[in-house]
Amino acid sequence: MGSTSVFAGYLNFSDGDDFTFFPLPTAWDPGLNTARVGGFPAPGAASWSVMGPTLSASPGDPHSGSTTSDLTALYAGGVDEITTIGLTLDKWAAVSGFTNLGMVADSGVDIGAPEASGGHLGDIRVGAIFIDGTVGPNVLAHAFQPGTEAIFGPGGTIAGDMHFDDSNIWSDGGGGGTIDFHTVALHELGHALGLGHSAVAGSVMEATYAGPRRALHADDIAGITAIYGALPVTAVPEPGTVLLLGIGVFGMFGYGLLRRKQVQNLKS
């Protein structure tokens, strides 16, 4: 692989007093397969897809020698894995100028495959694969910062991708010693959108998993809006405009009723 994007795992990393960016700050631009270096804040957008099983990692990738498994088989019951990815990405979009372009059909090519073969479909590819097991550091999942081949060179399509360790025990909720998939997905998508870790206790982007944490913290929101800007405000008509519009509509209906009465009087 060439000069690829940096990835961050959910455990054993902390930097600064609040939200951080990757050493080379990148973000998604509006449109498919478009990204930028810096230029914060500005709107952005990304699509996402789910990688199927038996896909290989490119040489030099941290998963080299492993293959993906079925993401939809990580747990049973509750809100499924694919729905959860969409819901958690929507949470980031709901507080910033980022747009979730939705799920697209995955290209079905190996991790970090060339763009020419479809390695960029979707912008954020989500998969399950062995990372480090349940002992030692026990990295639950990791994700790569936004980017494209144009930014990172060969292998750069891995930018934005996120991987869940299939050797951990997952669930929708995190009860009974299991790991809450929703919480980890929300965290990893923060990385996939350009955020590093945060040292603020209680934030979603805090480096260490401490049980279910499904609501974005003020620090998380400050970080994502620093990259993509604030959520666009939808213009609301002034009260006087609404009143005039209502009078106009009533006038039209009233005129119709009056005309019908006049016609009836002429006929009688």
Image (spheres, rainbow, N blue to C red):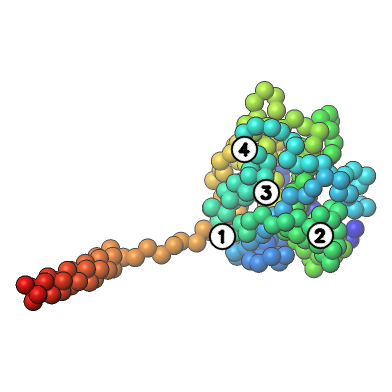
Q: CA distance from mark 3 to mark 4?
A: 18 Å
Residue behind mark 3? 189
Please name the amino acid that badge 2 sits on. Answer: Gly
Quarter holding residue 29 = bottom right
Question: Marks 3 and 4: which is nearer the front?
Answer: 4
Mark earlier in primary sequence (2, 1)? 1
Residue behind mark 4? 79
Q: Give x and y (percent) for residue 244.
A: 24, 69
Query: Which numbered tag is attached to residue 119?
Result: 2
Q: Quadrant of the C terminus?
A: bottom left
Q: Give x and y (percent) for residue 119.
A: 81, 60
Residue behind mark 1? 97
Q: CA distance from mark 2 to mark 1?
A: 26 Å
Please name the amino acid that badge 3 sits on. Answer: Leu
Please name the amino acid that badge 4 sits on. Answer: Val
Question: Marks 4 and 2: which is nearer the front?
Answer: 4
Q: CA distance from mark 4 to mark 1?
A: 26 Å
Question: Marks 3 and 2: which is nearer the front?
Answer: 2
